[in-house]
Image (cartoon, grey):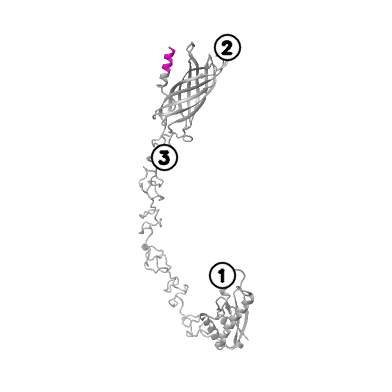
């Protein structure tokens, strides 16, 4: 009879619905069979387990479990050794943190608190175990498990024949087959249940892999299955359908559009920019002067600017503020035929030679002041470490000679300067040589020596600190302080 009971229980252990859940199911109910060892009685018996489990998370299940222990010694009248219902928490190592959730072999550990019935007594106890599962389908798995059941204190005959207090603890090992039921939820409806879905918020319609993650072949941020333009160039901005953005609807996508805000009325080139044939900044559709020469500043209609309305565009107008109605030359400046500073329109002496100082009417001024004459004088500049007067500077000396001839009652001071490079003594000598060159030319052009006074300053008048090339040139001169005076 006991043998039949044992075989029947062993058969049931492989036929009853078994433990835990597979990847797709959240409830499991099952059984297992194996052996146990009673460490006090030093006997081996049959262990039968049944339990119901519920999925909590990738890492944890909760289990309602019953362990049954049957004596292996057939001389014992009562074959049931212990009965231990318990509530366990199982930690699954196949949680994608330690092992893959779909691993071929799936290790776990469990522990819990129970209520043990043993030797006619009962009490609270605990148990712990470890095992490994081997899935054979989405529904069925085999598993192996070893564990420990902590006993309770009781009084009975010991294994050595004596009678007294004992404490039975049990070591157990079982093998089982399991089935899962009630499918796991699939919140994002992608066909991958939440417990194994690594991308749980996938939009509806997106194609996903076995881990529930969508693909994006063209890497535009819109998933395959939703993407209506599946071959969008990488890095191109796209709309919600995965198609390249063309914000201004000009036919050139934003990725290549150098003018992404072009109004619809403009025709555009391959860069998405409106046509501007004369490159004046005014698009052809708005340009009233489409052939404006390059570089000419234009108004909002694309025509050359002429702020003073003198007929000369501002780009070529050297006198852009000429009063309206004034006759101008090709440079946009009022016509001044004798170049005396009085325009022809106001000049009562339009043929006055340049050497004369004129009054407001453009006629020679017999009462010219020193300041007026000084305004006609210009410094003579020299190259670095040179004292010879160049051809282009010689005209300034001719101008001085003309003024001295026109106003014989005036004399002239000639001052010489040098930039601060070199020694102070050398610069003094260099500025004197420059004075000598200018004086020699004045004398050669007929200016009497008794009308000329000189002084060499060297680098004395140069500013302190690091000087620019322009500032250095400004100090390589004669007559920077030249003026005409009364003897």
Disc 2 residue crowd, few under 14, some 14–19, many 20+, Cα 10 Å: few
Disc 1 residue crowd, few under 14, some 14–19, many 20+, Cα 10 Å: few
The image's mark for residue 247 is none
- Above or below, 331 against 98 in this view is below
Expressed as whole percent of the image width and height from the top left, the position of residue 115 reads 52, 20
Q: Earlier in the sequence, mark 3 or mark 1?
A: 3
- Above or below, 302 against 369 in this view is above
- Above or below, 462 against 340 in this view is above
Q: Earlier in the sequence, mark 1 or mark 2?
A: 2
Query: Of helix, strand and loop, which one carries label 2?
Result: strand
Question: Is residue 270 at all visible to an observer of this figure?
Answer: yes
In the shown orientation, is residue 15 left or right of residue 37?
left
Q: Is residue 345 magenta?
A: no
**Which residue in the structure is indicated by mark 2?**
163
Q: Depth check: 78 or 236 in front?
A: 78
- Above or below, 408 against 231 in this view is below
The range drawn in magenta is 1-9
Q: Do the residues under discs 1 and 2 have CB atoms within 8 angstroms?
A: no
Query: Of helix, strand and loop, which one carries label 3?
Result: loop
Disc 3 residue crowd, few under 14, some 14–19, many 20+, Cα 10 Å: some
Cα–Cα span, label 3 and label 1: 66 Å
Cα–Cα span, label 2 and label 3: 66 Å
Expressed as whole percent of the image width and height from the top left, the position of residue 340 reads 50, 82
Expressed as whole percent of the image width and height from the top left, the position of residue 186 reads 41, 34
Q: Is residue 6 magenta?
A: yes
Cα–Cα span, label 1 and label 2: 116 Å
**Which residue in the structure is indicated by mark 3?**
213
Q: Which residue appears farthest toward the right when viewing the image?
A: 425
The image's mark for residue 468 is 1
């Amino acid at each position: 009879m006991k043998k039949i009971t044992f075989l029947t229980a062993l058969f049931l252990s492989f036929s009853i619905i078994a433990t835990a859940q597979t990847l797709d199911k959240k409830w499991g109910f099952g059984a297992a069979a194996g052996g146990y060892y009673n460490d006090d009685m030093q006997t081996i018996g049959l262990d039968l387990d049944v339990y119901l489990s519920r999925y909590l998370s990738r890492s944890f299940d909760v289990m309602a479990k019953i362990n049954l222990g049957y004596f292996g010694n057939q001389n014992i009248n009562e074959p049931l050794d212990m009965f231990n219902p318990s509530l366990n928490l199982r930690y699954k190592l196949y949680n994608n943190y330690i092992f893959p959730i779909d691993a071929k072999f799936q290790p776990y550990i469990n522990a819990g608190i129970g209520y043990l019935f043993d030797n006619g007594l009962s009490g609270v106890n605990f148990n712990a175990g470890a095992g490994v599962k081997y899935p054979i389908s989405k529904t069925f798995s085999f598993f192996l498990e070893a564990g420990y059941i902590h006993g309770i204190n009781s009084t009975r005959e010991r294994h050595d024949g004596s009678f007294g207090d004992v404490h039975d603890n049990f070591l157990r090992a079982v093998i089982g087959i399991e089935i899962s039921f009630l499918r796991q939820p699939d919140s994002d409806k992608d066909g991958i249940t939440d417990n194994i879905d690594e991308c749980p918020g996938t939009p509806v319609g997106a194609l996903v892999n076995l881990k529930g993650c969508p693909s994006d072949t063209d890497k535009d941020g819109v998933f395959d299955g939703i993407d209506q333009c599946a071959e969008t160039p990488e890095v191109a901005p796209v709309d919600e359908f995965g198609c390249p953005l063309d914000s201004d609807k000009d036919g050139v996508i934003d990725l290549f559009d150098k003018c992404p805000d072009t109004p619809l009325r403009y025709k555009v080139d391959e860069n998405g920019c409106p046509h501007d044939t004369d490159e004046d900044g005014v698009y052809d559709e708005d340009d009233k002067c489409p052939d404006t020469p390059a570089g000419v500043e234009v108004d909002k209609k694309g025509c050359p600017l002429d702020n003073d309305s003198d007929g000369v565009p501002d780009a070529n107008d050297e006198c852009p503020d000429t009063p309206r109605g004034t006759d101008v030359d090709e440079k946009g400046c009022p016509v001044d035929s004798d170049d005396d500073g009085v325009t022809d329109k106001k000049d009562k002496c339009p043929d006055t030679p340049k050497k004369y100082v004129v009054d407001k009417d453009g006629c020679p001024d017999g009462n010219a002041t020193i300041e007026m004459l000084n305004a006609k004088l210009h410094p003579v500049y020299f190259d670095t470490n040179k004292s010879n007067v160049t051809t282009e500077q010689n005209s300034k000396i001719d101008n001085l000679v003309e003024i001295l001839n026109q106003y014989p009652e005036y004399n002239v001071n000639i001052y010489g300067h040098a930039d601060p490079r070199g020694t102070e003594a050398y610069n003094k000598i260099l500025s004197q040589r420059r004075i000598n060159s200018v004086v020699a030319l004045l004398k050669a052009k007929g200016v009497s020596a008794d009308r000329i006074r000189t002084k060499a300053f060297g680098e004395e008048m140069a500013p302190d600190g690091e000087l620019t090339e322009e500032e250095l040139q400004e100090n390589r001169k004669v007559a920077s302080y030249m003026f005409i005076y009364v003897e």
